[in-house]
Amino acid sequence: MENYIYINDQLLPATEATLNVRDLAIQRGYGLFDFFKTIGNRPIFLDDHLDRFYHSADEMGLEIAFTLNELKGMISTLIAKNNIPDSGIKLILTGGYSDDGFTITGPANLIIQQTPLVIKNLSDSGIKLMSYHYQRQLPSVKSIDYVQAIRLQKQMRESGVGEILYYYNSIVGESPRSNFFIVTNNEILTAENNILKGVIRGKIMGLNIPGYTVAERDFTMDDLFAAKEAFLSSTTRQAHPVVAVDGRPIGDGQPGPVVREINRQLFGLMEKE
Amino acid sequence: MENYIYINDQLLPATEATLNVRDLAIQRGYGLFDFFKTIGNRPIFLDDHLDRFYHSADEMGLEIAFTLNELKGMISTLIAKNNIPDSGIKLILTGGYSDDGFTITGPANLIIQQTPLVIKNLSDSGIKLMSYHYQRQLPSVKSIDYVQAIRLQKQMRESGVGEILYYYNSIVGESPRSNFFIVTNNEILTAENNILKGVIRGKIMGLNIPGYTVAERDFTMDDLFAAKEAFLSSTTRQAHPVVAVDGRPIGDGQPGPVVREINRQLFGLMEKE
């Protein structure tokens, strides 16, 4: 079974889905993306992701040549064509073909690709992180700039951790592909500034968790190490308990009850989509 | 006349020089490059550029599948095939094809492309800059990350300036594609830290300019506005006089004699290559 990918308005077999090297993603790392999941061929939180996709394009001065309805139509066509019921769908918008390899001279190039992705409830599966001092550029934009995250892959493997946690001047930020939360005695906290505001992060902020207020407010590494629980949030992970950072246990070093309750509610929201 | 481009060991017409969208440059902006010029089909300062290309690859954890001699052979073949005597040749190394669009799983992809480039002596052609508060990530690496520079193109056009000058915490750094120098009463100064150390910058540091010491030492925006002259250095520009920054004139607001002397000597070095 061949997988299909959109390049602009053309639906092509994955092996033929190419860009000429004049594209500004290849020449200058210039592009942005968004990523959502499908469960049983139903897109989950699609409007939130497409809203952010248009926002990112706007922030990077690129124009998406398709209306929201046209994009949705292409996504439906892709889902029908590929028939991968549980999947991740990634939309990439690049700087387009440039005459001089630097200046934006052509229309942006759009890629829509789909890969299998089975969503699991990770409430019982703790992940360990390593911290790294870094502030992403254009933090509110989902750009394709993952230079630090890719470069740190070897160090992560050597350290036996599953993900990185960016902090900057002692303020905790986010992970390369996830937001980050801590749980205190009465709050569920996530960073407010200089991060990408993820779709699942937003859903969690709207939950009603008995005994806790969910708030966005910047907090420090010390706050993290004093927390009862911590977790990552993303389209792939939902809420994923963090049991250690830099080898130091978080709380009692085990997945906790607050993450479990959050996942219970998130999976309920996903059911309703 | 069709222009040819190397993709790994394949020499292809430019229109067929493509990468599959699974490449990590497209997925994650992960790649690096170098750029040198040819004059009358002679590569200029080639060894310096190739040294840096291997250094950048090493810093980004990527392997160039070709030895130095193999690369030089491919460059010679490209020059003979294209016959563009005065040109710029760009080598790009991307993160390669990734199975999951994130992890480095395959060999890096190499691109070698050539475009016409006529080198002029710009000693009499002043350029205006706009400053921008920014520190590039991995500053010693010639990565393809030009997110800020591309994004600022519209603002540059609106401001009527020809280039950006990055500074950070009041320390002057570099331009997106050039190094930056100022001329004081007895020194020719360029930043020491957190910049890409350009090949032309290195050549200028080796020059003997009567009455001046050439030094690398960090300096401030105030130092810049007190300077007698300022200039950009790059493979494309050689030494290019900067006559204003943010609308404020540098020195008397005209190209000066020190830049002229530097270009005289640089063009002499290029003749000898």
Image: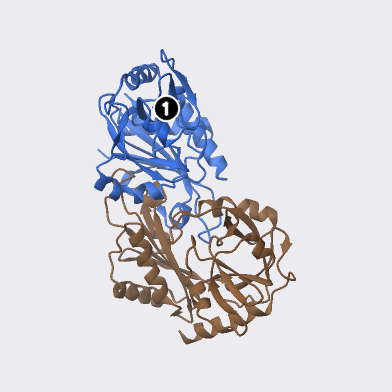
Chain colours: A blue, B brown
Q: Is residue B26 above or below residue A272?
A: below
Q: Let me know if residue A116 appears in the view.
A: no
Residue found at x 39% / y 52%: B30
Q: B161 and B185: which one is in front?
A: B185
Q: B83 and B87: which one is in front?
A: B87
In the rendered structure, which amino acid carries the disc numbered 1? Answer: Ile
Horizontal and vertical percent position of residue B205:
51, 76
Q: Chain of mark 1?
A: A
In this image, A206 relative to B47: left or right? right
The residue to which callout 1 is attached is A200
Residue found at x 47% / y 67%: B197
Q: B106 and A38: which one is in front?
A: B106
In this image, A11 relative to A159: left or right? right
Horizontal and vertical percent position of residue B268:
53, 86
Q: A22 and A264: which one is in front?
A: A264
Quadrant assignment for the N terminus of chain A: top left
Q: Is residue A263 above or below residue B71?
A: above
Residue found at x 64% / y 51%: B155
Q: Is residue A43 above or below residue A35?
A: above
